[in-house]
Image: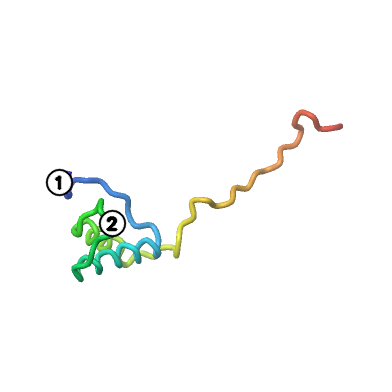
Amino acid sequence: MPGNCGSRKHTPITSEKQRGLFGAELARRRAGKESRMKGITTSELERHLHESKGKNLPKSVSSHSPVKIKKREGTIGDSY
C-alpha cells in the first residue's frame, strides 16, 4: 500500500549502523541517484531518521550474541 504510508507500522532504527544506512539512502535519493532500498519511501526514511534523532543508540546490534548455558547438577548419568 504505497499510498497509505501514514498508518503503516514500522520497526524503529535500533543502531548507529542502521541510522547510517538510512541516512545514506536518503542522501542518495535527494541527490537523484538510484535507490538501493526499493521497499521504503523517502517520507518513511525521513520519519525513521527523525524518530531516532537524539537517541543514544548502540554502534551495532548483534542477533547472534553468545548464549550462556548453566551446567545443571544432578542430571541423569552423573556419578555419585
Using the image, determine if residue 43 lies above or below residue 80: below
Q: Which residue is mark 1?
A: 4
Horizontally, residue 74 falls left or right of residue 14, namely right
Residue type at numbered disc 2? Met
* Residue occupying the far bottom of the picture: 31
Front-lying residue, 51 or 1: 1
Using the image, determine if residue 54 lies above or below residue 5: below
In the picture, the disc for residue 37 is 2
Q: Quadrant of the N terminus?
A: top left
Residue type at numbered disc 1? Asn
Q: Residue at x 25, y 63 (%)?
A: 50
Using the image, determine if residue 22 lies above or below residue 71: below
Regarding mark 2 in the picture, which secondary structure is present there? loop
| Spot occupied by residue 77 in the image (x, y as percentages of width and height) | 80, 30
Other-residue count near label 1 (Cα within 10 Å), few / some / many at <14 / 14–19 / ≥20: few
Front-lying residue, 70 or 59: 59
* Residue occupying the far left of the picture: 3
Front-lying residue, 78 or 27: 27
* Residue occupying the far right of the picture: 80
| Spot occupied by residue 79 in the image (x, y as percentages of width and height) | 85, 32
Confirm or deny contact between disc 1 and disc 2 (CB under 8 A). Answer: no
* Residue occupying the far front of the picture: 34
Other-residue count near label 2 (Cα within 10 Å), few / some / many at <14 / 14–19 / ≥20: some
Q: Residue at x 25, y 65 (%)?
A: 26
Q: How many marks?
A: 2
| Spot occupied by residue 13 in the image (x, y as percentages of width and height) | 34, 57
Q: Quadrant of residue 59?
A: bottom left
